[in-house]
Amino acid sequence: MGSENNIYSEEFCNTVSEHSGLGNRYAYLSIEDFVITNPEQESIKSFIINYINKPNKQKDNVVFAGNRGTGKTFASAIIARELLKHKHIDNFAYIPLHKFVSECKNSFDDKSFNALEYYSEIEFLVLDEVGSYSLTPFDHQLLFSLVDARYANNLKTIFVTNMANTNQLFQFLQPSVADRLVESMEYIYFGEKSLRNKTMMF
């Protein structure tokens, strides 16, 4: 198998680890690593496979919700890596919401990197820890600018949250952001029970 198709090749994994924000923990994942340990994960794995095989037919926004340790970030990493592997996308980024806000604020002083522009234009984005930290009104405005730009250009985003349902999520988000999400959103619930004690991958 050529290195361009080998998701475990050093070149490919270095690209994922160094340029996406996922880090080494998720650098070697593939769909084969998604081991089903409970009945609920059957439908989650089916969703992941469908998304990977037919990304253009999927909705622009996906919300992965559930308690900590239920595999949300793990599943997001698999999707992003597999899309890159099969050349459905040329680039992607993973970033927690609080880090996105921090990078945007820092880039106001450091003109060498415009964080808001970068994450608004990246082809595929995983925005993690949505709702885990409180946001100031200015932080909410940054999030709106991000979501609005991606909405205008039909760019795909996975929102990862520990919130149990869409009501909690939409109470956290400003109405202008929630409106853009709900227009083209798939909601996937990962459950309440942490899997970290049972598998190394979660």
Image (tube, helix red, strand yellow):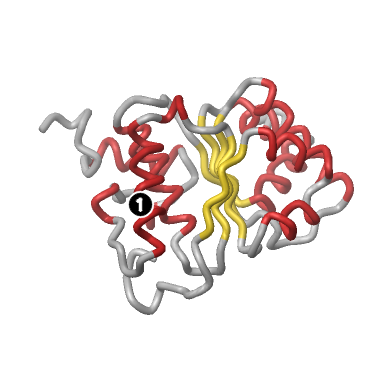
Which of the image's four quarters has the N terminus?
top left
Is residue 99 left or right of 36 when viewed as pictured?
right
Number of numbered labels in the structure image: 1
Position of residue 42 relative to residue 186, above or below, is below
Where is residue 115 drawn, in percent x and y? Answer: 67, 34
Q: Is residue 173 above or below residue 131?
A: above
Amino acid tagged 1: Lys
Q: Secondary structure at mark 1?
A: helix
* Front position in the image: 160 or 46: 46
Q: Position of residue 78 (x, y in %)?
A: 37, 47
Image coordinates of residue 177 in percent, x first then y, are 77, 39
Q: Which residue is depicted at the point 79% across and 60% down?
A: 134
Q: Is residue 9 above or below residue 2?
A: below
Q: Residue at x 30, y 63 (%)?
A: 36
Q: Position of residue 193 (x, y in %)?
A: 48, 75
Q: Identify the residue shown where x is 61% and y is 39%.
A: 185
Q: Quadrant of residue 49?
A: top left
Residue matched to label 1: 45
Q: Residue furthest bottom?
A: 197
Q: Where is the C terminus found, in terms of image quarters?
A: bottom left
Q: Quadrant of the rendered structure where residue 41 is? A: bottom left
* 159 or 36: nearer the viewer: 36
Q: Is residue 173 left or right of residue 96?
A: right
* Neighbour tally class for label 1: few under 14, some 14-19, many 20 plus, Cα within 10 Å: some
Tell me the residue at 83%/43% (across/down).
175
Q: Residue furthest right?
A: 137
Is residue 20 or residue 128 the one in the foreground? 128
User: Can residue 9 be seen in this snapshot?
Assistant: yes
Q: Is residue 112 visible?
A: no
